[in-house]
Amino acid sequence: MTTGSRASDPEFKQLVFDQRVGQTPFSTPLEPGQFYWRVSGVRGGVEGIRSSARHFRVRRSLGGPPLHVALPPSVVRVDRYVVAGTTQPGATVLAAGQRDTADDRGGFAFEVALKPGVNVVVVEAIDELGNSSYASAIVNAKFEGR
């Protein structure tokens, strides 16, 4: 038998879960927040020394990070276009084979090379939990190829 404890503070004064369980591993429902846990063994009705406290954070994922992008218009007469926007600060941003991290305000900018004719420009933002958001545009570049 094992005693498992989970609390919202490192001193275990605000217990969320504290009970003896008949099996290991054991599980309890987890809501979003930061928690601390510890366990101890029970033999013959006597509880042993508790483990040192460990902490973990539970986050709820409700979708990808916000993504606002100034995409090129449907027709351009240039061979390069700066795609800029904002997302969650620290998110990974991908565009035209390039990878960068959004700055501390969530800003990013990429220079995208266009070929004559139809181009598909896709921007992806990925947050720290791996959730993605996308923005895209079909762009017809009308200029003489070099």
Image: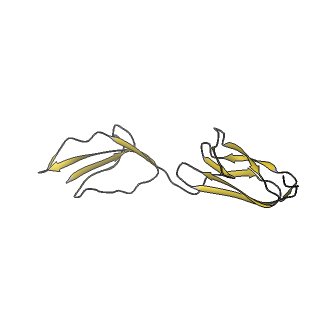
Residue 34 x, y percent position in the rendering: 43, 44
Residue 55 x, y percent position in the rendering: 38, 42
Q: Quadrant of residue 108?
A: top right
Q: Nearer the viewer, residue 22 or 116?
A: 116
Residue 100 x, y percent position in the rendering: 63, 44
Can you name the residue that lies furthest to the left here?
A: 44
Residue 83 x, y percent position in the rendering: 75, 49
Q: Is residue 134 above or below residue 83?
A: below
Q: Nearer the viewer, residue 7 or 79?
A: 79
Q: Nearer the viewer, residue 10 or 146?
A: 146
Can you name the residue that lies furthest to the front here?
A: 146
At horizontal 65% and vertical 39% (from top left) the residue drawn is 103
At horizontal 79% and vertical 49% (from top left) the residue drawn is 81
Residue 46 located left or right of residue 25: left
Q: Nearer the viewer, residue 73 or 42?
A: 73
At horizontal 33% and vertical 57% (from top left) the residue drawn is 27
At horizontal 83% and vertical 56% (from top left) the residue drawn is 73
Residue 85 located left or right of residue 146: left
Residue 90 located left or right of residue 135: left
Q: Quadrant of the N terminus?
A: bottom left
| Colour approach in the figure | secondary structure
